[in-house]
């Protein structure tokens, strides 16, 4: 039995974007309940050389939209990366979900063999087939940034557990 590239991507991204949204809601509620300025969480990072929470969420959303969009061979929406609040991050997640769930399932057919070129025209250019791009690059990158967001919030006292990370499946 085979699994489609659509099934291996869009539903996974959607599940985790939903859980990311829920985790951010819990963080905002925690900040309000504990009288903590939201910026404390939004600018938090696990280590000085890592991106802050806002950037982690932006990158997670970027991977969801770019991986799904490239596999479906469609133009990618451009986001300005100007989010500053929990509401801004929720809006970014919502528009990312709206984009990826609007993609036609049929456009994913054959994408496992489709060439995906990362950073074209640069010294870091890399060509991967769609399956390698999704399974060995896109999903791991996406999960790294979702996990790091969860870890930043958990480290800063937001009460979260594995069920919060996993979301509904």
Image (cartoon, helix red, strand yellow):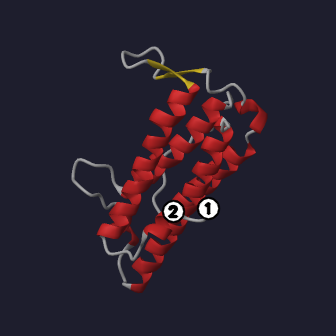
Is residue 163 shown to the viewer in this render? Answer: yes
On-image quarter of the N terminus: top right
Quarter of image, res 47: bottom left
Q: Position of residue 105 (x, y in %)?
A: 75, 38
102 and 114: which is toward the camera: 114
Horizontal side of 99 relative to 130 (left or right) equals right
Residue 169 circle label: 1
In the picture, measured across the screen, residue 153 lies left or right of residue 10, that is left
Mark 1, secondary structure of its residue: loop
> Residue 5, image x and y in percent?
64, 36
At 31% across and 61% down in the image, what residue appears?
Answer: 44
**How far across and down, in percent of the image, does residue 12 sit?**
59, 50
- Is 94 drawn above or below residue 8 in the view shown? below
**SS at badge 2:** helix
Disc 2 target residue: 166
**Is residue 142 or residue 86 the one in the foreground?**
142
Splitting the image into 4 quarters, where does residue 94 fall?
bottom right
Where 128 sits versus 33, above or below? above
Quarter of the figure with residue 65 = top right
Q: Is residue 88 left or right of residue 112?
A: left
Residues marked 2 and 1 touching at CB (< 8 Å): yes
Q: Residue at x 55, y 65 (%)?
A: 167
Identify the image quadrant of the C terminus.
bottom right
- Report the residue at 49% width, 41% height from top: 139
* Left or right of residue 70, residue 160 in this image: left
Q: Is residue 76 visible?
A: no
Spot the residue most to the front.
1
Disc 1 crowd rating (10 Å Cα; few below 14, some 14-19, many 20+) is few
Who is closer to the viewer here, 10 or 34? Answer: 10
Q: Residue at x 46, y 34 (%)?
A: 136
Kindly give the residue lying farthest to the left in the view shown. 48
- As measured in the structure, the alpha-carbon distance from the residue carrying label 2 to the one carrying label 1 is 8 Å
């Amino acid at each position: 039995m085979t699994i489609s590239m659509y099934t291996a991507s869009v539903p996974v991204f959607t599940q985790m974007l939903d859980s990311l949204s829920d985790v951010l809601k819990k963080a905002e509620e925690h900040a309000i309940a504990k009288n903590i300025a939201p910026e404390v969480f939004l600018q938090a990072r696990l280590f000085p050389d890592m991106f802050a929470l806002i950037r982690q969420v932006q990158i997670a959303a970027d991977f969801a939209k770019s991986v799904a969009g490239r596999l479906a061979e469609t133009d990618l929406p451009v986001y300005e990366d100007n989010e500053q609040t929990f509401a801004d991050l929720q809006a970014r997640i919502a528009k990312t979900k709206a984009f990826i769930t609007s993609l036609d399932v049929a456009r994913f057919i054959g994408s496992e063999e489709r060439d995906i070129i990362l950073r074209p025209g640069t010294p870091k250019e890399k060509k991967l087939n769609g399956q390698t791009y999704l399974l060995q690059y896109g999903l791991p990158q996406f999960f790294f940034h979702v996990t790091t967001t969860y870890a930043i919030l958990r480290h800063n006292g937001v009460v979260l557990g594995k069920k919060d990370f996993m979301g509904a499946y």
